[in-house]
Amino acid sequence: MRIVATLVLSVLASAPALSHAAETWPQRPLRLVVPVPPGGASDFTARILGAKLGELLGQQIVVENRGGAAGTIASDLVAQATPDGHTLLFSSSTTHGIAPSVYRKLPYDPMKSFTHIALVNTIPAVMVVHQSVPAKTVKEFVALAKQKPLLFGSSGAGSPPHLLGELFKMKTGAPLTHVPYKGSGPAVIELAGGQLHAMFDGLPSLLGNIKAGKLRPLAAASAKRSTVLPDLPTMAEAGYPGVEGGLWFGISGPAGVPPAISDTLSKAVFTAVAQDDVKERFASVGGFSSPLGPKDYTEYIRKDIAKWAPVVKAAGATVD
């Protein structure tokens, strides 16, 4: 009883301070923790948004890359931060859509440990292969994979690129071997260097090497063709319907961020992603603005968890 009383008094004592913080927020530069190393789609999107939010809020947004364990390390770090709106997570399909099903011992609860503030944008995935791979179509790649061992890389065990690869294996019967990395950046470097054969990821991570001729796109893992690569067929057009997925990114804080701060930041995100220069930069890599406020973003995450759970179970793609 003493412990419970102490906890209650502690919460009551902190309430006025958090209320005052909401009125004066932001009081100092904001820390936006990105759960991947520099170079991937998440990092690309976070830096575009961070710069624009800094202008709108009148405070610098410090982007801090914390890669490892498919984003769960960074997520846990933010979940334990003070909920005053100054430490934020660039939450994603990796950290909050897929990780809850992949990790048996996730250090945080994807719903209860966070205040979900805003969905920022979505980026459909693309399947690419190294230029040395002789397959020019998805069907040729599947046939090749059944003849010789092929490797596909991802931004980490349990990440969207990993699960898309597992879904591809389930739908095609291609016996690919997964090689995880600490972020899309390192994986793409290995793929471009020929140490891997294929990858399923968003265009921000891949486009430079596609343009350089080091990687060859085979299909878009989306319902519609990519606006950046309009001649690229979708997986359904390539003969494999149901192989769809991609990346989404948003902003979350620790549980308990005052509603006034959450609402202010959400509105700033809506303003930022509606600006032409931001929309153009997102579109340049096949992404598009798709802002949702706190309530809708929370429900969006809940539905994505439900979507990927059966895929993880069928693939046996769990991590201790």
Image (cartoon, grey):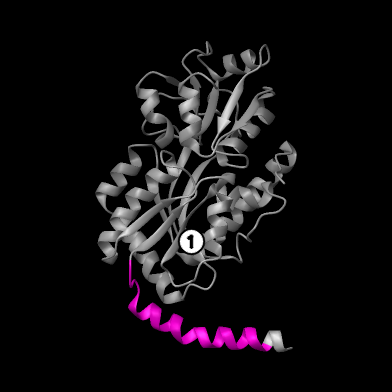
Front residue of this view, candidates 50 and 291: 50
Q: Which residue is mark 1?
A: 252
> Is residue 288 toward the left or the right of residue 83 in the image?
left
| Residue bounds of the magenta highlight | 5-28
**Quick check: can you spot residue 218?**
no
The residue sitting at 38% across, 47% down in the picture is 45
> Is residue 150 toward the left or the right of residue 82 in the image?
right
Please state the total of marks drawn on the protein image.
1
Front residue of this view, candidates 197 and 78: 78
Q: SS for tag 1? A: strand
Front residue of this view, candidates 226 and 161: 161
**Quick check: can you spot residue 27?**
yes
> Could you tell me residue 23's position as x and y percent?
35, 80
Question: Is the residue marked by circle 1 packed among few (<14), some (14-19), or many (20+) residues within 10 Å?
Answer: many
User: Residue 257, relative to residue 76: is it above or below?
Assistant: below
User: Residue 46, relative to residue 13: is it above or below?
Assistant: above
The residue sitting at 66% across, 13% down in the picture is 148
> Is residue 39 toward the left or the right of residue 304 in the image?
left
The residue sitting at 66% across, 54% down in the picture is 106
Question: Which part of the image, by quadrant, shows the N terminus?
Answer: bottom right
> Could you tell me residue 15's position as x and y percent?
50, 84
Q: Reply yes or no: does residue 215 show up in magenta.
A: no
Q: Main secondary structure of the magenta part?
A: helix
